Amino acid sequence: MICRFSDLRCKEVISIKTGTRIGFVDDMEFDSCTAKICRIIVFGRSRFFGLLGREDDLVINWCDIEIIGEDTILVSCDFPYGGKKKGGLLKNLLK
């Protein structure tokens, strides 16, 4: 299957371990010597409509990608979006 970057940006990333929706592909890293894709990047979720910034970006190694389908990309990584964050609102505001 031949895929362009614009095609990857329209695919939703889903964790197969937890079944959670991670987001959409926003960026990629590749090795300029070998021209191979190393990682895909999903930007962090915005906090309070983007006024308080956003969470950390998620970097997914190419070896963690299980399947690239027509609409989704299935990955086998653990991500922090599955459960509640510890630390409370004040800690997140100071982040």
Image (cartoon, rainbow, N blue to C red):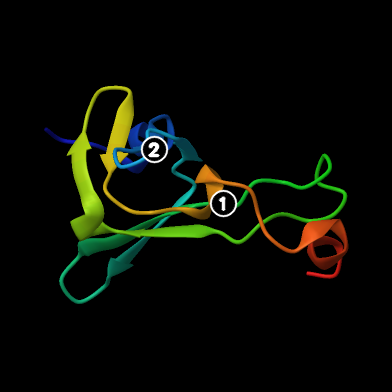
Q: In this view, does 38 lie to the left or right of 19?
A: left
| Residue drawn at (54%, 47%) of the image | 81
Q: Distance between the residues labelled 1 and 2?
A: 11 Å
Identity of the residue furthest to the bottom in this view: 33
Residue 23 percent location from the top left of the image: 50, 38
Residue 22 percent location from the top left of the image: 47, 40
The answer to which image quadrant residue 91 occupies is bottom right
Q: Which residue is disc 1 drawn over?
A: 43
| Residue drawn at (11%, 32%) of the image | 1
Residue 24 percent location from the top left of the image: 47, 38
| Residue drawn at (77%, 47%) of the image | 47
The answer to which image quadrant residue 89 occupies is bottom right
Residue 44 vertical placement versus 19 (above, below): below
Q: Which residue is disc 2 drawn over?
A: 13
Q: What residue type is labelled 2?
A: Val
Quadrant occupied by the C terminus: bottom right
Figure label count: 2
Residue 13 vertical placement versus 28 (above, below): above
